[in-house]
Amino acid sequence: MTVEIPRPILKDKKALVTGIANEHSIAYGCAKAFRELGADLAITYVNEKAKTYVEPLARELEAPILMPLDVSQPSDLDALFARIREEWGRLDILVHSIAWAPKEDLQGGLLDSSAEGFAKAMDISCHSLVRMARLAAPLMTDGGTILTMSYHGATKVVPNYNLMGPVKAALEACARYLAYELGSKGIRVHAISPGPLKTRAASGLKDFDLLLNEAAQRAPLGELVDIMDVGFTCAFLATPYARRLSGETLYVDGGVHIMA
């Protein structure tokens, strides 16, 4: 069967992108790729301090919706999705690019992590995907695509990734179970696993520069990926070209993950 695909390929699609902190964010690469391919954007910022960095990017991307979102606050989630329902009436794409852990728990080993810090990291970095999917699904009346950001440390031990390894492992499992539960509605769910990138979130990891250098040396393609590599991969997954893909963890890392 031939699939007729309009150009630009995401024209008139409605995409919610969460987790932009600045122009170096993976989420910004996703938003920029979606916009280049014709999608309309809703963009969030975590607090007023972040808004000063995110608001100019939202203007650049002509995003008609810019809203605060602290996923630990149910009222923020409710207000965001209510605005999308009111203004658009539907949603086609959701990008969950949110991860956080207390610094003292993130920079110590897993054995030293506190129960409270572990629980908070799991809630914000993992269960928030479930909460957002619950609100997004009723708006994806013609099907849709949900994408979340993981890392290789979910499946292999990466020194100094510490408690975020188990948290990302849980996130990938959530993506698979959501793909199963939402598949009958035509909603596809994927975890994206980028290679190391110089983002604000990554800067909190101990010896992150060493991780970057090692990845560049080990990558079969011989170089690191950038946020637009991740963004256009996510854009592809939101198109009809990927209509039979769901529940995958896709590596965008220049091939680093295949190396022993």
Image: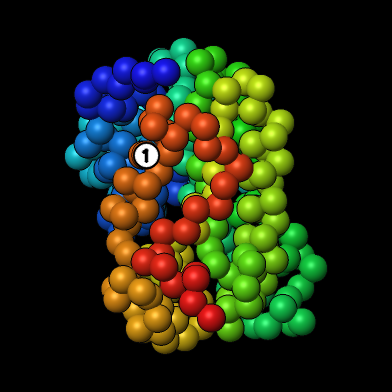
Apparent side of residue 258 relative to residue 126 in the rendered image (left or right):
left
Identify the element where label 1 is drawn: helix
Label 1 Cα neighbours within 10 Å, binned few <14 / some 14-19 / many ≥20: some
**What percent of the width, then of the height, locates residue 24?**
31, 59
Q: Residue furthest right?
A: 115
Compared across the picture, whether 159 is left or right of 6 comes to right
Identify which residue is drawn at 44% across, 35% down: 242
Residue at the spot 29% in from the left edge and 76% down from the top edge: 222
Instruction: Give the labeled residue for mark 1.
Output: 236
Of the pair 181 and 2, the residue shown nearer to us: 2
In the rendered view, does 139 fall on the left or right side of 12?
right
Viewer can see residue 39: yes
Residue 229 in percent (x, y) is at 31, 55
- Which colour scheme appears in the figure? rainbow
The quadrant of the rendering that contains the N terminus is top left
Residue 3 percent location from the top left of the image: 37, 20
- Name the residue furthest front: 1
What amino acid is found at the position of numbered circle 1 in the picture?
Phe
Total labels: the figure holds: 1
Asked if residue 131 shows in the view, the reply is no
Query: In the current view of this chain or complex, which residue is farthest to the left?
Result: 60
Image x and y of residue 8, in percent? 22, 26
- Look at the picture and state if 7 lies above or below 232: above
Residue drawn at point x = 28 percent, y = 42 percent = 33
